[in-house]
Image (cartoon, helix red, strand yellow):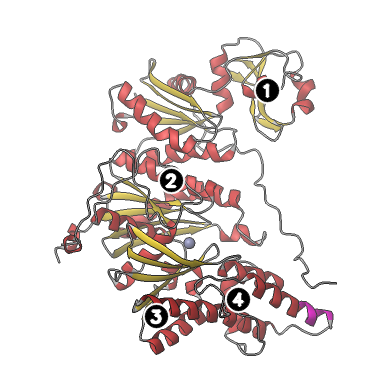
Amino acid sequence: MLLLALDTATPAVTAALHDGTAVVASSSQVDARRHGELLLPAVDRVLAEAGTRLDAVTGIVVGIGPGPYTGLRVGLMTADTFGLALGVPVHGLCTLDALAYASDFDAPFVVATDARRKEVYWARYADSRTRVTEPAVDRPADIADEVAGLPAVGAGALLYPDTFPRAHEPEHVSASALASLAAEKLAAGEELPAPRPLYLRRPDAQVPKNYKVVTPK
Amino acid sequence: MADSRDEPLVLGIETSCDETGVGIVRGTTLLADAVASSVDEHARFGGVVPEVASRAHLEAMVPTIQRALKDAGVSAKDLDGIAVTAGPGLAGALLVGVSAAKAYAYALGKPLYGVNHLASHICVDQLEHGPLPEPTMALLVSGGHSSLLLSTDITSDVKPLGATIDDAAGEAFDKIARVLNLGFPGGPVIDRYAREGDPDAIAFPRGLTGPRDPAYDFSFSGLKTAVARWIEAKRAAGEEVPVRDVSASFQEAVVDVLTRKAVRACKDQGVDHLMIGGGVAANSRLRALAQERCEAAGIRLRVPRPKLCTDNGAMVAALGAEMVARNRAASDWDLSADSSLPVTDPHVPGHHHDHVHEVSKENLYS
Ligand SMILES: [Zn+2]
């Protein structure tokens, strides 16, 4: 087995290869504005580092967010198209779950990433492998009661210390964690989610106001 | 001419606006033109909503690629290259197509060509009328653009002669349709009403046609305001608005200026043919009046069939095939979407390639 993992749901552009036993190569760069430019070269780099080629990959796992949409779609579109060209399965995995997995907590905690517009994407976990709430997007102040007293990881937690006074690293998701979690779940016979985006917000679309009268009064 | 199978087989991806287009061409022969449109999702907003378009591109991409391959009856491994619209267009929408094209080209081990949307609109005519004459005069008219372009080589040299200084022609159609409560998009519905109306019923202004105005620039904002005022005056007087006559007279004002300036550009530059492309080139009155005026001026008119005028992947593939045929440098894997890619850049060559060697025209397709 050779699993290629990608995630572009957070400011991190990250790719990793997992051979079923361990991560054999990985790359992470943090640049929220250049997901589109950085991802393919990153994939190329991890393949070269592992001394292999894309056609040796037997499966793909991609972070499905939640995350700011434009960047999120880069990873999903890349994974979808690789899957089409290679004829291999493409799996999705919640980006927050990969951050939780990397945290190594064995007690309840929260994962929160930056959703911009003064909001966070977040979910609560019983331990690093067990999510107990659906991913949601909220203003930090509005969820203060629900996360009170819990440690938290992710850039969203680090950004809002009033709501998350016990914020920890990791700040960003890594494809290594995504790959390891996916490999663990696949080995256990678990079904992974479809590679479809978790937007959690409706598109911003203002219905144009009544046509503007141009005749001077 | 050699066996057509020696010509480049290229798949093109277009996502600059609301159409997810995947086309496949062999040289100047169209093999597939698969398009998935999200236009219905935008209708209730009265215009294209970028985020709605981007979401739709992600969902439609893989099935549209599969459909194009099936329609063309070719295998992906036989492709000579993957072309994609790198710009101009909606940034988020472009990025979906560029991501797909890069992943597809990389996975298949094929060269990637990031190309210009406007040059593609011109190059598509090769699929209809054969190789473009050089130079080519092109009038590009769509919801986003109204430009006069002169190209001596569609892969390397596109010069803008003039462009709209305010609204694009297609935008004016959409806005007038909204004032008339005809829905979105406005082009096809105004064309339909106009056929039953009198183009001379109302004398609407022709923008930038005065003797001291720039010869090749366009302006449709004043026309739009004049039409809206005329309609409001009717409504204020409690009279019924003659939708057919308004549509016909407005449309006539737009296509009169477009064709007049395009024919003048051909004459001034000594170019004896005119290519018209872009979504508004599907307008029946524009096609008819251009034909009439070109004939009178001894200019040969080339307008692709309407489906090739609107945004599609075949036009991107057509330009990609030309890039391959003329040995243009492929793009790099870090190709980015450029929402304001200048019209003067027909494609986005990589930085790590050797200098492009000019190929003599005799070598093309031979
Ligand atoms: Zn267009």
Specify whether disc 2 shares its chain with disc 3: yes
Nearer to us: label 1 or label 3 = 3
Q: Quick check: A14 left or right of B102?
A: right
Disc 1 vs disc 3: Cβ atoms closer than 8 Å?
Answer: no
Looking at numbered disc 2 in the image, what kind of residue is underneath it?
Val
Tag on residue B176? none
- Judge whether B184 appears above or below A168 on screen: below
Q: Quick check: A22 left or right of A216?
A: left
User: Could you tell me how far apart the alpha carbons at marks 1 and 3 are, in whole angstroms?
Assistant: 63 Å
**Magenta residues (range):** B232-236
Q: For the residue labelled by badge 3, is the local secondary structure a helix, a strand or a loop?
A: helix
Q: Nearer the viewer, residue B344 or B329?
A: B344
Say whether disc 4 or disc 2 marks the residue closer to the N-terminus. 2
How far across and how far down the image is residue B221, in percent? 64, 70
| Chain of residue at mark 3 | B
Q: Main secondary structure of the magenta part?
A: helix
Looking at numbered disc 3 in the image, what kind of residue is underneath it?
Lys
User: Could you tell me how far apart the alpha carbons at marks 4 and 2 are, in whole angstroms?
Assistant: 37 Å
User: Could you tell me how far apart the alpha carbons at marks 2 and 3 are, in whole angstroms?
Assistant: 39 Å
- Residue tagged 3: B267
User: Could you tell me how far apart the alpha carbons at marks 1 and 2 are, in whole angstroms?
Assistant: 32 Å
Does residue B234 show up magenta in the picture? Answer: yes
- Residue tagged 4: B207
| Chain of residue at mark 1 | A
Looking at numbered disc 4 in the image, what kind of residue is underneath it?
Gly
Tag on residue B98? 2
User: Could you tell me how far apart the alpha carbons at marks 4 and 1 are, in whole angstroms?
Assistant: 53 Å
Asked if one can make out residue A84 in the rendered structure from this viewpoint, the answer is no
Q: Nearer the viewer, residue B25 or A2?
A: B25
Tag on residue A159? 1
